[in-house]
């Protein structure tokens, strides 16, 4: 990283290909810029900025929401827009995560792609929801476009090739699927989550959970799926009891981080309660849940 | 780098690096010092302004991405020689202004709320103010002011 003597400059790309071209050419000296709400905090936190930012806001393709299954959501879709995203109950966890994240003034600007791509952002709310929804990312790079599982993308997020940007997220929306999201904060609303939980389940006609996807955010340095918790939810209808058991299983499989907001043991201790809350919210419209 | 902005209906030209926060441009380049730098990381709401039809934390907004839509600040909610905006008037009347640091942000958030919802209940007001911290903790008076301003605006219609 080169020394930055003045504030970085910004170039506006008018297409995905232009952005990719500039980013590939500038390499480590450049980064993509979406809403900017994460990177603008870098200086205050003593983190380095890069020399040039390639702004994506004038690329209409990145704002588009298309398709019905999967629903394809452009990377520049804001949290506010995601909270009102049209689509079946399978998407509830994402709508709820977007609605409860940060504050209105940030949700109005912060984007889907930024939330996924922001390095070091351990509390990102959308990421666990997207993991539970089995999101796939459409990426554009110097070699063209590719679609990858979000899980695979996150595994090497900090070492992605220069010139790559997130174009969209593909969200499968099976009609048997319901999902819910819950987060714990120091204040009543907004803020960064101490821990967050997204649950997505497929249920048979009698309510028995046939498959489950569970992700936990803010507990480890990177949001993760919790296979033991998923196993705990299968084979019975989703209830407070099964959700708490799954939360206990997740607590056992996570290695929690400590921070100023909470010690590690606390982040896992609250998981059963958060699992119960997320299960309660599964299948409910975002407006019926409190701030 | 030179940027053209529309601020409170006026065209402004500023010469700053693109990643300069809009808040710094408003305060240091355009002498619009209503919006405050409280936390500088989008948690306190003292820097709230409107960009197009939405409220934003101007401390986190690079000026380079603020050029495509009109910006309005607390200085623009009432005409320079005119009466205060009903939201401002109500904050004064109801005792919703104490030290004043949060007031410009509160005004912007409440103006935005009352445009979207002319008849909010107290809970909706509190919900809307989740991103605005009053360091004097005078929230009850601010919520009262919002309800009073909403009534005044409905009457004026």
Image (cartoon, coloured by chain):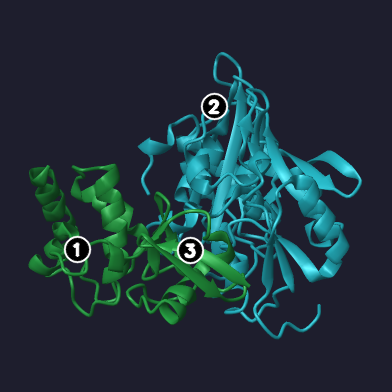
Q: Residue at x 68, y 27 (%)?
A: A70
- Front residue (pair B95, A236): B95
Q: Which residue is mark 2?
A: A87
Q: Quadrant of residue A30?
A: bottom right
Identity of the residue drawn at 58% across and 72% down: A41
Q: Can you say whether B150 is above or below B71 in the image?
A: above
Image position of A2 with respect to B18: above or below: below
Write down which chain is painted cyan: A
State the image coordinates of residue A194 (x, y, percent, origin top left): 53, 61
Q: Earlier in the sequence, mark 3 or mark 1?
A: 3
| Residue at position x 48%, y 46% in the image | A80
**Side (left or right) of A129 relative to A104:** right
Residue closest to the eye, B126 or A266 = B126
Mark 3, chain letter? B
Q: Is residue A163 visible to us here?
A: no
Q: Name the chain letter of the residue that bears numbered label 2.
A: A
Residue B124: x and y in percent read 26, 47
Which class describes the residues within 10 Å of circle 3: few (<14), some (14-19), or many (20+)? Answer: many
Q: Which mark is residue A152?
A: none
- Residue B28, position as x, y percentages in the image: 45, 81
**Which residue is situated farthest in the right direction here?**
A143
Are the residues tagged 1 and 2 within 8 Å (C-beta)?
Answer: no
Per the rendering, the colour in which chain B appears is green
SS label for mark 1: helix
Q: Kindly identify which residue carries mark 3.
A: B5
Find residue A46 and report its image quarter.
bottom right
Taking the image as shown, residue A36 lies to the left or right of residue B106, namely right
Residue tagged by mark 1? B142
Residue at left offset 26%, top offset 63%: B107
Circle 2 SS class = loop
**Separation of disc 1 and disc 2 at Cα?**
37 Å
Q: Secondary structure at mark 3?
A: strand
């Amino acid at each position: 990283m080169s020394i930055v003597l003045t504030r970085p400059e910004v170039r506006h790309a008018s297409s995905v290909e232009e952005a990719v071209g500039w980013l590939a050419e500038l390499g480590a000296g450049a980064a993509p810029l979406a809403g900017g709400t994460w990177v603008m905090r870098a200086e205050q936190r003593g983190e380095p900025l890069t020399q040039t930012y390639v702004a994506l806001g004038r690329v209409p393709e990145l704002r588009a929401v298309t398709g019905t299954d999967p629903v394809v959501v452009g990377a520049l879709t804001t949290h506010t827009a995601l909270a009102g995203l049209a689509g079946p109950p399978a998407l509830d966890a994402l709508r709820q995560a977007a609605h409860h994240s940060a504050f209105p003034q940030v949700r109005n600007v912060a984007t889907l792609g930024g939330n996924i791509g922001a390095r070091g952002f351990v509390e990102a709310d959308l990421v666990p929801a997207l993991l539970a929804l089995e999101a796939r990312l459409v990426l554009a790079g110097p070699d063209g476009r590719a679609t990858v599982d979000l899980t695979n993308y996150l595994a090497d997020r900090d070492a992605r090739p220069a010139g790559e940007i997130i174009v969209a997220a593909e969200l499968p929306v099976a009609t048997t699927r319901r999902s819910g999201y819950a987060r714990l904060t120091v204040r009543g609303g907004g803020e960064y989550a101490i821990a967050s939980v997204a649950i997505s389940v497929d249920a048979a006609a009698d309510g028995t959970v046939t498959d489950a996807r569970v992700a936990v955010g803010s507990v480890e340095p990177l949001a993760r799926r919790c296979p033991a918790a998923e196993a705990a939810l299968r084979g019975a209808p989703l209830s407070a009891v099964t959700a708490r058991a799954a939360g206990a299983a997740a607590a056992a499989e996570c290695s929690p981080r400590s921070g100023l907001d909470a010690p590690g043991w606390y982040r896992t201790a609250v998981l059963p309660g958060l699992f119960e809350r997320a299960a309660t919210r599964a299948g409910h419209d975002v407006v019926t849940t409190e701030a | 780098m030179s940027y053209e902005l529309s601020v409170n209906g006026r065209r402004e030209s500023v010469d700053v690096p693109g990643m300069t926060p809009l808040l710094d441009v408003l305060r240091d380049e355009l002498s619009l010092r209503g919006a405050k730098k409280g936390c500088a990381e989008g948690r306190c709401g003292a820097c709230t302004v409107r960009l197009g039809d939405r409220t934003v934390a101007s401390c986190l907004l690079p000026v380079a991405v603020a050029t495509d839509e009109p910006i309005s600040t607390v200085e623009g909610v009432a005409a320079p020689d005119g009466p205060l905006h009903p939201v401002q008037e109500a904050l004064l009347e109801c005792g919703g202004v104490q030290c004043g640091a949060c007031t410009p942000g509160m005004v912007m958030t409440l103006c935005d709320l009352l445009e979207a919802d002319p008849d909010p209940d107290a809970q909706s007001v509190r919900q809307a103010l989740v991103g605005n911290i009053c360091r004097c903790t005078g929230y009850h008076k601010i919520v009262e002011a919002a309800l009073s301003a909403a009534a005044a605006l409905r009457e004026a219609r």
